[in-house]
Image (cartoon, rainbow, N blue to C red):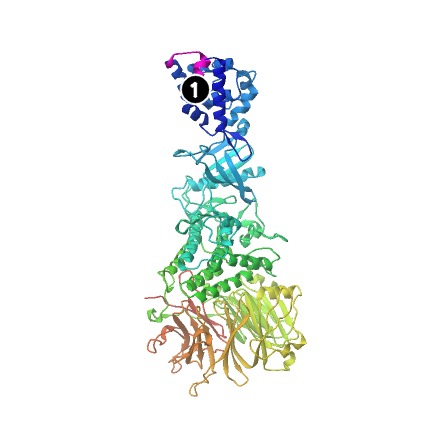
Amino acid sequence: MGDDTLTSLCRAFITKLNGCAAENYDGQPFFPNGTANDIFRSNLQELRDLLRCLLRIHSDDQLSGIVKRILKDHSNVLAILLLIRLPSDELERYVRKIPNGNAFGQTICLTDDRLPVNRNDAQRLFPDLGDNFYGMQFHFCPVTLRKHHEASYDNDKRRFPLPYLSQEPIGEGSFGHVYKVEIASRQWESEDGRSDTPRWLARKEFKINRRNAFYEEKLVLDWIRKQRTKHGNVAVHLASLQHGSTFSLFFHLASCNLWEYLSGGDVCKTLQSYPGESYKPSNLKEKAAIFGRGRDVAGALAFLHTRFESDEFKNVACYHLDLKPHNILVFDAYQEDREQWKITDFGLSRVKSWRTPVGDIRLPFIRRPEIPGTRNNRGEGTYLAPEADKGKMRMESDVWSFGCIFSLVLSYIDGGPSRVKEFQRQRTQLQSHNDCFYITDYWNRHILSPVVANWFIRLEESANSRGNPEARVFQETLEFLRKKALNPEWSKRPATEKLYNELRRISSIFNSQQGMPSPNPRRNSSGRSFRRVLSSRPQKLGVSNMTGSTFSPGGKLLAFYSSRTIVVFDVERIQQATTLHNPQPTFSFPAKNGPWQCCAISSTYLCAWRQASSFECYIYPILPAFPSTENSNVIEGRRVSFPNIGQIREVALSPDGMFIAFAAYSSPNFTDPTRTILFMFETQRLIDGSAEGNLSPPSSRSSSLASDASSNRSLGGNSYTVPRLHSVGHIKHISSLAFSTNGRYLIMCAQDEFRSLFIQAWQTARDAFLVKFFIPYQGSDHLSGANFTACALFNGLPTLVMLLQQQQMVIIPNLGSGPPTLKTLEIRAHNIFVQDDDNSIILVGDKGSGLNRALRVYTMPASGNSQSMKPEEVAQTEIWSYERSTDSIALTGINENGERAILIATLKGSFVQVFLPREG
């Protein structure tokens, strides 16, 4: 065989090699691992012919030995020499050295595993084509990714081609971008060997100036990956790569992130499993599954916070510190049992030993929630906890972020992507496009955004319309988010294990079509299961010369008032004090510009109004902003006045202080002494409006409002205060004005000018009139006392239970839509409450006759026959007299031990708490 044959064989191999070359996303050609070896193995006869022609040898044994050597160690080198068209004499010189195992003597050993050689060596080996060899060799050395390994390509290795056949951006963050990349076949290696097919992965690329961020995140991910226990809802990296100045982490490719999923983003619309733009969860199975996936994310967070171990410490904790929907990946979206959500992006995370005191963590880079003038599409700052304002974060900061995320999950369950986007739109409108779940009020306190609290009410109302078990799931979840996970005070938020366990308990309610209580810490409160207990001894409070008292809903605060001053006690401090030590008030508010008439209080605000000819009140911040008496003298109230409206008659604050309602005379100076109007504000908007002078009172013709209860008028067109004026007609006496425990309804009990007792109700979230009905009961002649005593609203359906003349109990289903039930009690009751599960009623009263007139606590079933619906005494106090007009009673929420208590305060300064007995 001659030179022509040799040339023909060389060209044939060049053609085959070029035909197997790949090209990456940047247009750079490369040969995937093993390409040259495969070509030579599949064309062994042609390889033999080439070697025989080149070396002019005929011994098959000698030829076989050279072929084996080439296939073992020299495939890439031979392919490079062919591609650069090395002259035949130099090619022969190289091949003849192969049997010796050292092609060019002791100084340079040119084998496949020694590639790449530097430019000087290439020029020394191939004086005429050294630069060609140097450049061509990199095409045979593409970057190879190995599972759970860090690949580093620096110096000359920076020229190794990246193995991404295609690359498209799918996200970006403060540290860089995220791409969807197709890894060429054989460029990904795992424990099972090289992948023979292309593989899709997600690549997180860090910016040039974020090298430290790469190593910090990789360090955290390595910690997670090396744990003996794993959690399926934490996304850990598969491999890492340093390629020159570019640093990358590789992950399994998700369908989308949680924000895209919940909001119906464009990425989701490209998925084959996408159910369509109008999709929303339609059955309990779907809703339970989505709730469960959110619950599992809470479990993953608990795992990060509590389940770590290291060689140095038995227990360590990982704080994520940047939790948001964009950092939760959705895998196998819309594929029922396969779908899974996983926490990712640990760029801001910190790992701390449990031996280290848990405290504030100063972050090197904090995404500030204040982004004026721009819409915060990526959620940067939206989900950060209030303490991030000062650049400090804690473990509990993750709980806040999760609470924000789970409120989106509930919105999605309620109505699909449209509800999630509507929720976002309302948040951004409140604060000039600054999307945040908390706000800073006039007194520089962090409070839950009124939009968020209002949205929770709307979600609960929507779920209630669908009945149990969904109604109960939403009620208990939203209550937990509002009071616990989204508490602006980090110390009041639950640990993540408790968060997960609570959501796991609530999710089990889906398994019951009736939404009956599941086995859990929250016990059924049927009165028949209570044991009788004694109350604590009364404590003496440091008050005197007062004219009235009132508890905040839930009993966290206790206020005493007189014309000269109002003092407020923190009930927790009273409970911590001994009976020998008289607890002193936490706050004191002297009268302003005239004597105080009365006050209303919630867990966050106090509203005091004075005796005046027109509308005037002062709103003060309470807990948690000023927890010590040293601050009491510096609290300034916001004055709110409407000169065109008459004197305030009653004020009500919702339990969380989000809403405030006023009943006032329709005109000043008592020109129409019984005509009354009612209007309701979001408290924070009222404060902001008064602080910035944006309140627009009604015109002088406000008193000409229509007498129909549903008529309404705006209180001004500014952005802060646009409540509706509800004319409630001529009212002789307002017996009660109060919000329901869950804040969804405002209930007024009053007597009209003919002394007929009626109920009027509004929905707070919509500031909408709901119903007005008269009580068909004029009182019993043989019973003493005013007709109205007290009332309470059930937590589920708006069923009202009323006490009349202290011994008549009326149950009014669904606020008057059903026939009322009247029952005569054998006790004299002063107040009435409904347990959270609506299964039982709590009464506080006395026996009404005889020498033993001590106050007692009773419980009774909320429904049943006349025999079973009898009050059963469960506790007796040492309070021997009670005056309903000046003394107060409250039912607390459930404490950490699963207990709740009745609190009683008298004008003389006596305070007593009665813990309700548990089951059994």
In the foreground, 442 or 811: 811
Quarter placement of the N terminus: top left
On the image, the x and y values in percent for residue 230 come to 40, 44
Residue 22 percent coordinates (x, y): 50, 31
Is residue 50 shown in magenta? yes
Q: Residues within 10 Å of mark 1 (few under 14, many from 20)?
A: some
Q: Secondary structure at mark 1?
A: helix
The percent position of residue 585, horizontal first and vertical second, equals 53, 67
Residue at position x 43%, y 80% in the image: 806
Residue 323 in view = no
* Total numbered badges shown on the rendered structure: 1
Between 708 and 666, which is closer to the camera in this rendering? 708
Task: Tell me where residue 486 appears, x and y as whole percent.
Answer: 50, 57
Q: Is residue 395 visible?
A: yes
Compare residues 115 and 87 and report the one nearer the observer. 87
In the depicted structure, whether residue 699 falls above or below residue 120: below
- Is residue 317 one of those drawn in magenta? no
* Residue positioned 63% across, 73% down in the render: 616
Asked if 838 appears above or below 412 in the picture, the reply is below
Is 441 positioned to the left or the right of 815 in the image? right
Outermost residue toward the bottom?
A: 781
Query: Looking at the magenta stretch, what is its main secondary structure?
Result: helix
- Quarter of the figure that contains the C terminus: bottom left
Residue type indicated by callout 1 = Leu
Magenta residues, start to end: 46-60
Task: Locate residue 784: give its quadrant.
Answer: bottom left
Residue under label 1, please give it.
Answer: 47
